[in-house]
Every structure is written in C-alpha cells, then in structure tokens.
Image (cartoon, rainbow, N blue to C red):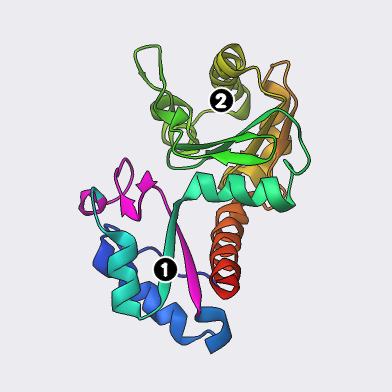
C-alpha cells in the first residue's frame, strides 16, 4: 500500500501519515518502527533537508515520533537504509571490499558498504563536478526536467561513477531508486570498469532496510 507524501513534506504532516499507517498494522508489527528519510540522521536527529522541508533540519525525529506515536521509532537515511537491505539480503550480500549504492531519484543518495558493513552518512550526491552538485545534473529528476535521452543521461552518469571509481576503487556499484526498474535502458550507456547492478529490492530497498533496522533493535531489546 502506498500513501502520497503530503505537499511540503513537513514533519507534522508526515507524522499524521505514519499514524494512519500504524492504524492498519497488527499490534505485533508495531513494537519498533523503522522510518527512512532523505536526510542525514545522527543520534535520532535529522540534520539536513536537501529535497524536503527545512523543518527537518536539526529536528528531534526519533524522540518526536516515538512520543507522539507511543511506539519506539528508529530513523535512518533512506539511501543508508537501502544499502543496509542490499548488504543483508540483496545485491551486495557477500561482497568483499567496498560496494557503493546510489539511489537515483529526486536527488542522488548514497551508501558505502565495506565487507557488508554500512558506513553511514555519505552524501555523494553532493560531490561537486563541473561546478555544481552532481545531483543537480545527474539525478533522475534532472533527466526528466531536461528531457534527456537515456544515452545522454548515461554519459553524465559515466562521469559521476568514473569519479567515484577514482576515489574509492569499489568492487561493485548498486543502483536503486525509482528509475532502477528501468536499468536495462540506461546501464549500457554507463561506461565504467566496475560492475554495475540494480538493487535487488529496486525502489523498495529503503523500506526493507528500515524494517530490518527496526527488527534488529527489537531483537536486541528482547535479549536485554
């Protein structure tokens, strides 16, 4: 089931949608909640808001949602959540060395994985190339906004991923986000040496990762 993001995406409006979703869940599924959000998340606080309401900046997300919903809530960056899912159950499972997951959507999110472990808080979509953040020219939103063909967009993506190759020497790139379902249409135009694969969970990787995170917290709580 999908729910539209409220216009503006302010915390209070998102909280209302989450409360509505909770009403449809069985009690056993609500002990711990995982929420992925397009923001840097540290110590339960959302710290940035590149493509969402600025009200999320330095917002006590976990405390606010946990108190308002009366359920323990765990926030994680959406790309980090996708990376967590792909490392545990998806395309990056069992990969030694570094894997870089990127989500191509409104912006470009990223997750760094080393031997299956997540290194959180990377923001590779904000790397500067050609005088601007790469997501301003290379996100799927930029492709749609400029009416780019997959061939032209693939050339732009090549410069981005080639730059990441130079910096990180990864073993694998995993591509998520809504456009990942159409990977066959643009992967042939991304000319790099590192293998490039779609996320196993495609655009649902972040949802799966947030759920896995909540499940781990629940399991840890029960062991205490």
Looking at the rendered structure, the secondary structure element under dot 2 is: helix
Question: With 60 as the anchor, is 91 left or right in this view?
Answer: right
Residue at far right of view? 94
Q: Disc 2 and disc 1: Cα gap in Å?
A: 38 Å
Residue 16 magenta-drawn? no
- Residue 145's image quarter? top left
Looking at the rendered structure, the secondary structure element under dot 1 is: strand
Question: With 174 as the anchor, is 25 left or right in this view?
Answer: left
Horizontal and vertical percent position of residue 122: 46, 33
Q: Earlier in the sequence, mark 2 or mark 1?
A: 1
**Nearer to us in this view, 72 or 50:** 72
Residue at left 62%, top 16%?
165
Q: Are marks 2 and 1 in contact (CB under 8 Å)?
A: no
Q: Which residues are magenta?
A: 31-56
Residue 42 magenta-drawn? yes
Residue 26 seen from this side: no
Residue at left 45%, top 86%?
23
Quadrant location of the C terminus in the rendered image: bottom right
Residue at left 46%, top 28%?
124
Question: With 121 as the anchor, is 216 left or right in this view?
Answer: right
Horizontal and vertical percent position of residue 2: 51, 69
Q: Which mark is residue 207?
A: none
Residue 72 position (above or below residue 194): below
Quadrant location of the N terminus in the rendered image: bottom right
User: Around disc 1, counting alpha carbons within 10 Å, would you say few (fewer than 14), some (14 to 19), or many (20 or more)?
Assistant: many
User: Around disc 2, counting alpha carbons within 10 Å, would you say few (fewer than 14), some (14 to 19), or many (20 or more)?
Assistant: many
Residue 196 seen from this side: yes
Q: Which residue is mark 1?
A: 73
Q: Which residue is mark 2?
A: 153
């Amino acid at each position: 089931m999908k729910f539209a993001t409220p216009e503006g995406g302010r915390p209070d409006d998102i909280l209302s949608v989450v409360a509505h979703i909770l009403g449809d869940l069985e009690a056993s599924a609500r002990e711990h909640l995982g929420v992925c959000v397009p923001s840097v998340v540290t110590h339960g606080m959302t710290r940035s808001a590149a493509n969402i309401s600025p009200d999320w900046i330095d917002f006590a997300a976990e405390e606010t949602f946990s108190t308002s919903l009366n359920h323990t809530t765990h926030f994680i960056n959406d790309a980090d959540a996708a990376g967590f899912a792909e490392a545990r159950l998806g395309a990056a499972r069992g990969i030694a060395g570094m894997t870089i997951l990127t989500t191509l959507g409104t912006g470009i999110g990223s997750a760094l994985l080393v031997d299956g472990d997540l290194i959180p808080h990377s923001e590779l979509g904000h790397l500067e190339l050609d005088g601007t953040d790469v997501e301003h020219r290379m996100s799927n939103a930029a492709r749609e906004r400029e009416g780019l063909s997959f061939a032209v967009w693939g050339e732009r993506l090549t410069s981005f991923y080639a730059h990441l190759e130079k910096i990180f020497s990864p073993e694998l790139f995993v591509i998520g986000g809504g456009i990942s379902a159409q990977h066959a249409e643009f992967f042939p135009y991304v000319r790099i040496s590192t293998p490039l694969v779609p996320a196993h969970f495609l655009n649902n990787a972040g949802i799966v990762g947030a759920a896995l995170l909540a499940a781990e917290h629940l399991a840890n709580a029960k062991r205490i």
